[in-house]
Image (spheres, rainbow, N blue to C red):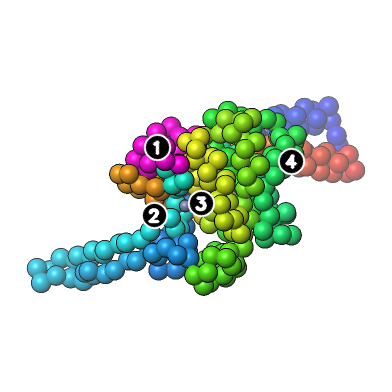
Amino acid sequence: MKVTMWTPVFCLFVWFWLPLLGKAAPKPEWIELSYQFNNGTIYWPTSLAFKHIRLSENFTGAGFYYSAYDISAAEHGGTHIDSPRHFAANKWTTDQIPLDRLIGPAIKIDMSSKAAQNRDYQVLPSDLEAWEEKNGKIPDDIILLLFFDWGKRWPDKLTYLGTDTNDTSLLHFPGIHPNASRWLVKNRKIKLIGVDTASIDYGQSTLYESHQILYERNIPGLENVAHMDKLPIKGFTLYAAPMFITGGSGGPCRIFARLDKEDCTVNAAIRLRSVNIFLVTTVFMFLIFL
Ligand SMILES: [Zn+2]
């Protein structure tokens, strides 16, 4: 076989058209960011844990199947929302948080390497600035997630919280330093914040200053956000759907994300392009050496 003048033309033709296969059916990618509620769900050590009590789970005398359960739990446990009212009088209760504060474009700041070295690590303003240097300014009205890679410890209380007792002085997990919260409310305009630990303040906190600073500005918090490792740094939309509790200081929350369609398509096309370049180069070299 010989290389003819048509060979490169053919290769270019294939290279340009193949990526369109990837664009033909871009699939949205949904990511679950909640833990399930069950008897093993982690709650704050002093809180009432989730109870799921069976009332009925069988065929009735009339012949149909019927199951029903009672549930009870504290507001703050498992994947949940902290309403601003949790630490700020007169700020929003769970039912008062506007829906547009619970849905929207989000970013993830990866603090996993620092948390791996120090389980009492607190995110500093310099960490936020370092993220911005790499990824651009934190946009207005964004949902900000802080990723400590803490979910890999779930649902083991001892490694996740630092203790499996009710002694809160033994809590050890990373969080947001009050200075970083001050920096955020002063310099940026975030609408919701989330962490993959049990609290936005670190485990050893006794004043819960980040709770006070952020909630005073009506910025709700998401705690025990699951599977953050599956999220990119940016290019996704977050949905948080808390239980609609009148006057609540928080509540159980279903959280999930959708990777931006454009990004999925672009990424798929880039991946296909890379594969194409490899394949075409291989074929070309093969033809040359024949
Ligand atoms: Zn909470």
Precedes in sequence: disc 4 or disc 1: 1
Q: Is residue 85 magenta?
A: no
**Residue under the image location 51 percent in, 72 percent down:** 165
Q: Give the range drawn in magenta.
A: 88-104
- In the rendered structure, find residue 223 and report the number of the disc placed on it: 3
Q: How far apart in space, not on screen, are marks 3 and 1 (Cα)?
A: 22 Å
Residue 57 in which image quadrant: bottom left
Q: Ligand 1 closer than 8 Å to the CB at disc 3?
A: yes
The answer to whether residue 31 is above or below residue 153 is: above
How packed mark 2 is, by other alpha carbons closer than 10 Å (few <14, some 14-19, many 20 or more), is many
Circles 4 and 1: CB distance less than 8 Å?
no
Q: How far apart in space, not on screen, are marks 2 and 4 (Cα)?
A: 33 Å
- In the rendered structure, find residue 126 and report the number of the disc placed on it: 4
Q: Name the residue under label 2.
A: 75
Label 4 secondary element: helix
Residue 274 in which image quadrant: top right
How packed mark 4 is, by other alpha carbons closer than 10 Å (few <14, some 14-19, many 20 or more), is few
Q: Mark 1 points at which residue?
A: 90
Q: Ligand 1 closer than 8 Å to the CB at disc 4?
A: no
Left or right: where does residue 130 sit relative to residue 181?
A: right
Residue 36 in which image quadrant: bottom left
Q: Tell me the amino acid under the disc marked 1.
A: Asn
Label 1 secondary element: loop
Q: Tell me the amino acid under the disc marked 4.
A: Ser
Circles 4 and 3: CB distance less than 8 Å?
no
Left or right: where does residue 286 sit relative to residue 201?
A: right
Q: Ligand 1 closer than 8 Å to the CB at disc 2?
A: yes
Q: Which of marks 4 and 1 is in front?
A: 1
Label 2 secondary element: loop
The picture places residue 55, in percent across and down from the top left corner, at 22, 69
Q: Nearer the viewer, mark 4 or mark 3?
A: 4
